[in-house]
Amino acid sequence: MKSASASCPTCETNLKDKQDALNKCVEYENTIKRLEDEKLSLITAIRLLQEDSQSIHSKTDKIPANSGPWEKVNRKGKRNNNNSQDQSQTKNDDKAADAEGYGVNQDESSKKRSVVILGDSMTKNIQGWKLSTKDKHVARTFPGSTVEDMSDYCKPFTRQNPEKIILHVGTNNVVNDTPTNVATKITNLAKKIKKDLPSTKIAISGLICRKDEKLNNNIKQVNDVLKKSCNSNNWKFISNHNIGNDIINGSGVHLNRKGVYTFASNLKLAINKD
């Protein structure tokens, strides 16, 4: 009896050590998962920065070297006789820049709300800056992305703490997944974003129909569930029911010019209603 009772503290110690080791393993696993998620986010951020850099360089390369006359200024700072003409040209250039949205006063720009549109290839021709004059828009397209992919792609943008996030994703899930699963995945993604950004407004853009009646039935079911989810979570649902087969291009999936205009109008209407 004594030996049995004496061994109890040892057993308890061993059990406690095992429990501590198990807790550490779980903690290490969570740390590894978090680091892997951060790695994916950083890779995505680097890729986006590279795309922006390439875009800027391509635009710069298109500017001709002799795009404007050079003018010699004397030591006293006086310009030549074309001074008044240059001032007039500068004013005209400033007006043109304002008209294109590049000459916006910094104070005015800082007051604008930030809106991030994240989508799959259906959003590839959406130009965010055309959707609203009172908001700063970032429209990012990730061709071929699924809802699962978007959970990684969205992280660099959620870190910016935008006032609104519009999600258009699920097009590439609907082919191989059930409507209920697709809608649930989209809803869970939106919930995850909302949990990280409680003050950010969430909007979900409904899936767009295709030239495939079987898939269109699934798309309708997805949209029905999404609409209910948006209502119950106080999110905005953007309906794209006005996009029919007549404004889908030859691929049977993507939009023609009229389709892009209609889609952009749907987004614009939803954004400017707030």
Image: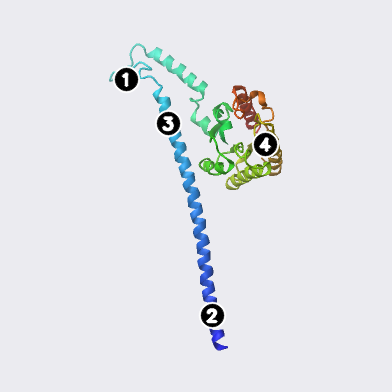
Quarter of the rendering containing residue 150: top right
- Hey, what amino acid is under mark 2? Pro
What mark, if any, has residue 54 been given in the picture?
A: 3
**Depth check: 193 or 251 in front?**
251
Which of disc 3 and disc 2 is earlier in sequence? 2
Specify whether residue 40 is in view: yes
Task: Indicate the position of residue 61 as horizontal and vertical percent values.
Answer: 39, 24
Which mark's residue is nearer the viewer, 1 or 3? 3
Cα gap from disc 2 to disc 3, whole angstroms: 67 Å
Residue at 44% across, 29% down: 55
Check contact, mark 2 vs mark 3: CB within 8 A.
no
Residue 117 appearing in the image:
no
In the displayed image of the protein, which residue is found farthest to the left?
Answer: 75
x 56%, y 26%: residue: 130
- Left or right, 214 with respect to 114, comes to right
Q: Could you tell which of marks 4 and 3 lies nearer the N-terminus?
A: 3
In the rendered image, residue 70, in percent from the top left (x then y), is placed at: 33, 17
Q: Where on the picture, by quarter, is residue 9?
A: bottom right
Instruction: Return the disc, 1 or 2, that comes first in the chain's sequence.
Output: 2
Q: Which residue is mark 1?
A: 77
Question: Which residue corresponds to mark 2?
Answer: 9
Q: Earlier in the sequence, mark 2 or mark 4?
A: 2
Q: Nearer the viewer, residue 99 or 181?
A: 181
Tell me the number on the disc at residue 237: 4
| Residue type highlighted by circle 3 | Gln
Q: Does label 1 or label 3 sit earlier along the sequence?
A: 3
Q: Nearer the viewer, residue 169 or 136?
A: 169
The quarter in which the C terminus is drawn is: top right
